[in-house]
Image (spheres, rainbow, N blue to C red):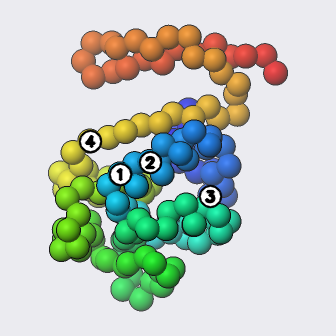
Amino acid sequence: MSLNGYIAGEDNNEDFISHDCWLAWLEAIRKHGCMVWGRKTHQIVKTWPKEYIEDIKGVKAVVISSDPNYKVSSGFELVRSPEAALETLEKQGFTSVVLTGGATLNSAFAKLGLIDEVIVNVDVFELKLELIETKRLKGKTIQLHYKVVSH
């Protein structure tokens, strides 16, 4: 997500995501060997340049949509629910998966208690920032303190 909490812009553009975040995401999905995302994310992925699709070759990709007639791209498998996604992957020998969807899909998995770990990469969005300090506050809060760098 970006610093302002968005996963994509209003036009579904993700150009603000840094190359470092892209590489970290690739490392995660390759480590687990599989990933799950929803229809909305898949719609965006269909518009990606070919080299990005090449980067995810060899990773099992499952798309969740309640529409059984939704057409997924070659190399992707369609299922209808979070439970079906996990069942499909388990039958294929996977023991962990990267959930890489948006808010709707992430919430569906969370409500079902199907998330064991969360990794948050925060990108700077529209502001040039310099990280000053990371501080662990009481409870489960982490504070990121940034300085705005002049344009």
* 10 Å crowding of disc 2: few (<14), some (14-19), many (20+): few
The residue to which callout 2 is attached is 27
The amino acid marked with disc number 1 is: Lys
Question: Is label 4 in contact with label 2 (beta carbons under 8 Å)?
Answer: no
Residue at figure coordinates x 82%, y 21% from the top left: 151
| Sequence-first tag of 3 and 4 | 3
- The residue located at (64%, 35%) in the rendering is 125
Judging by the rendered image, the residue that carries numbered circle 1 is 31
Q: Where is 149 relative to 1, above or below?
A: above
User: Residue beneath label 3, please?
Assistant: 12
Label 3 SS:
loop
Q: What separation in Å lies between label 3 and label 1 (alpha carbons)?
A: 27 Å
Instruction: Identify the amino acid type marked 4.
Output: Glu
Q: Say which of marks 4 and 2 sits in front.
A: 2
Closer to the eye: label 4 or 1: 1
Is label 3 in contact with label 1 (beta carbons under 8 Å)? no
Q: Residues under labels 4 and 2: Cα distance?
A: 16 Å
- Mark 4 or mark 1: whose residue is earlier in sequence: 1
The mark closer to the camera, 3 or 4, is 4
- Residue flagged by tag 2: what amino acid is it? Glu
Amino acid type at circle 3 is Asn
Q: Secondary structure at mark 1?
A: helix
Mark 3 or 1, nearer chain start: 3
Asked if the residues shown at circle 2 and circle 1 are in contact, with their CB atoms under 8 angstroms apart, the answer is yes
Does residue 143 sit above or below 124 in this rendering?
Answer: above
Tell me where residue 120 appears, x and y as whole percent: 42, 37
Q: Between residues 86 and 106, which one lies in front from this camera angle? A: 86
Task: Confirm or deny contact between disc 3 and disc 4 (CB under 8 A).
Answer: no
Label 4, residues with CA under 10 Å away: few <14, some 14-19, many ≥20: few
Secondary element at image label 4: loop
Q: Marks 3 and 4, how far apart in space?
A: 26 Å
